[in-house]
Image (cartoon, rainbow, N blue to C red):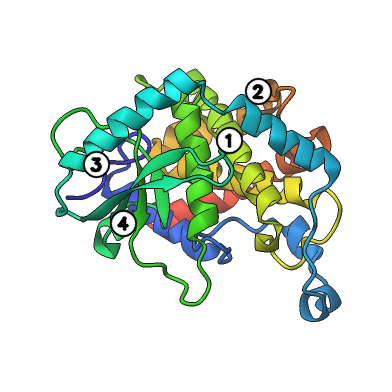
């Protein structure tokens, strides 16, 4: 059974666009690929690339921001117990097959031992997803009868022998499950209009930024080797978030609608910035590069009809 799409229907043509854009992007630690802004490439000097293996360590401000996100996204006991009861029941009735290998309740390191339901899948099932993913959270795929809880899907087989990325990946997805549980995750637009897409874009970027910041503050060694400066953990987290969602935008919404919205994407990001959101200078840097990234996506879209 192919997985449901994480965003509105992507169709085979837009799936091809995703793979085309993906081929342009550098390989990053979790196996997916991201846009590589020229400004960031310029920072990778030969000396820093070849002789230094240091990674940026989280600053106190970054740790505090991640702690605030974790605190804000930790569900109340009653909310989590309701999820866990549903998750345990769903696990008990799930029969392996149709791509599902096994289901486990995995304890979280970041969320203090709370257990989350993870369905481990075959490579074939995960590869049928339109994006190059190792794991994703929701939407609900009916592997078993009944009403499934918020679900995480992850590859049964790690794609990087000798270097497991599964723990950070799962913790990232636990953040998303909590966002869904608390009702703050981005809603898929029921109607595709410019305003609904812009709102989805800004909210999804914020959701991803929160998950990446928590992930990289906890595991800063996963940053690329040329990210060594104070503040780079937040910078990289936002870059991962916003390029990922930009790629998804061009993948799942009609190209002509996205084309018209490109000049407004920066405004949407700025308008959505909240107290817990990204540092203003990092946001501005990303906004300044956004048109260039959109142009890359547009070129790739046209070269992969
Ligand atoms: Zn994510």
Find the distance from the CA under tag 2 to the CA under tag 1: 9 Å
Mark 2 Cα shell of 10 Å, populated few (<14), some (14-19), many (≥20): some
- The answer to whether marks 2 and 3 mark residues whose Cβ atoms lie closer than 8 Å is no
From the image, tell me which residue sits under label 1.
205
- Residue 65 is situated, as x and y percent measured from the top left of the image, at 74, 35
Find the distance from the CA under tag 2 to the CA under tag 3: 37 Å
Q: Nearer the viewer, mark 2 or mark 3?
A: 3
Mark 1 Cα shell of 10 Å, populated few (<14), some (14-19), many (≥20): many
Outermost bottom residue? 50
Q: Nearer the viewer, mark 1 or mark 3?
A: 3
Find the distance from the CA under tag 4 to the CA under tag 2: 32 Å
From the image, tell me which residue sits under label 3.
91
- The answer to whether marks 4 and 2 mark residues whose Cβ atoms lie closer than 8 Å is no
- The answer to whether marks 2 and 1 mark residues whose Cβ atoms lie closer than 8 Å is yes
Find the distance from the CA under tag 4 to the CA under tag 1: 23 Å
In the picture, which quadrant includes the C terminus? bottom left
Q: Which mark is residue 272?
A: 2
């Amino acid at each position: 059974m192919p997985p449901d799409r994480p965003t509105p229907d992507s169709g085979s043509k837009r799936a091809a666009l995703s793979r085309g854009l993906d081929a342009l992007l550098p390989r990053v630690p979790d196996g997916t690929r991201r846009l590589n802004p020229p400004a960031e490439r310029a920072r990778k000097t030969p000396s820093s690339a070849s002789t230094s293996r240091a990674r940026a360590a989280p600053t106190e401000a970054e740790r505090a921001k991640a702690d605030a996100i974790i605190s804000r996204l930790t569900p109340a006991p009653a909310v989590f117990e309701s999820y866990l009861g549903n998750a345990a029941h769903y696990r008990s009735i799930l029969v392996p097959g149709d791509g599902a290998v096994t289901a486990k309740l995995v304890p979280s390191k970041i969320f203090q031992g709370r257990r989350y339901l993870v369905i481990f899948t075959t490579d074939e099932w995960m590869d049928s997803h339109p994006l190059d993913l190792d794991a994703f959270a929701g939407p609900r795929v009916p592997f078993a009868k009944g009403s499934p809880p918020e679900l995480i899907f992850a590859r049964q087989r790690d794609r990087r022998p000798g270097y497991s990325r599964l723990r950070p990946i799962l913790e990232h997805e636990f953040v998303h499950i909590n966002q869904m549980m608390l009702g703050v995750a981005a809603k898929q637009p029921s109607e595709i209009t410019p305003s609904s897409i812009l709102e989805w874009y800004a909210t999804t970027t914020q959701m991803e930024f929160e998950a990446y910041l928590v992930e990289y503050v906890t595991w800063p060694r996963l940053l690329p080797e040329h990210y060594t400066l104070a503040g780079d953990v937040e910078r990289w987290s936002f870059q991962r978030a916003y390029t990922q969602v930009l790629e998804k935008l061009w993948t799942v919404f009609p190209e002509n609608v996205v084309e018209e919205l490109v000049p407004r994407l920066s405004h949407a990001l700025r308008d959505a910035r909240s107290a817990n959101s990204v540092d203003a200078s990092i946001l501005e840097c990303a906004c300044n590069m956004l048109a260039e990234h959109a142009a890359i996506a547009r070129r790739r879209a046209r070269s992969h009809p």
